[in-house]
Image (cartoon, rainbow, N blue to C red):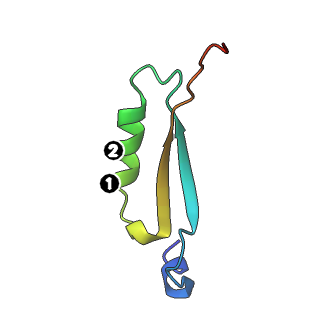
């Protein structure tokens, strides 16, 4: 992964981390903190928190 930053142009993230919040049971915070404490440059990745909203149709 260290070589990826040398080849990366920085225009968009190299990869995305998707954290679903629907039934996280409090674990999303640990996951978020784990990813944000990585030594990889933050321009290499993005973290997406996804909350699925279920509304009753009228």
Residue that appears at 49% across and 63% down: 45
Q: How many marks?
A: 2
The foreground one among 18 and 56 is 56
Quarter of the view holding residue 16: bottom right
Q: Answer left or right for 56 relative to 37.
A: right
- Residue 48 in the image: x percent, y percent? 50, 48
In the displayed structure, 22 sits above or below 29; it is above
Badge 2 crowding class, 10 Å Cα cut-off, few under 14, some 14 to 19, many 20 or more, is few
The foreground one among 51 and 42 is 51
The residues tagged by marks 1 and 2 sit, at their Cα atoms, a distance apart of: 6 Å
Instruction: Determine contact: label 1, label 2, CB under 8 Å.
Output: yes
Q: Answer left or right for 6 relative to 32.
A: right
The foreground one among 5 and 2 is 5
In the displayed structure, 13 sits above or below 47; it is below
In the displayed structure, 1 sits above or below 3; it is above
- Residue 6 in the image: x percent, y percent? 50, 86
- Residue 11 in the image: x percent, y percent? 52, 79
Q: Secondary structure at mark 1?
A: loop
Q: Quadrant of the C terminus?
A: top right
Q: Which residue is mark 1?
A: 37
Q: Which residue is mark 2?
A: 33
Residue that appears at 49% across and 29% down: 21
Q: Secondary structure at mark 2?
A: helix
Q: Answer left or right for 53 relative to 39.
A: right
């Amino acid at each position: 992964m260290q070589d990826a930053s040398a080849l990366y142009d920085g225009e968009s993230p190299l990869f995305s981390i998707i954290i679903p919040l629907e039934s996280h049971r409090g674990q999303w915070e640990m996951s978020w903190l784990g990813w944000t404490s990585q030594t990889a440059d933050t321009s290499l990745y993005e973290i997406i928190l996804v909350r699925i909203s279920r509304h009753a149709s009228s």
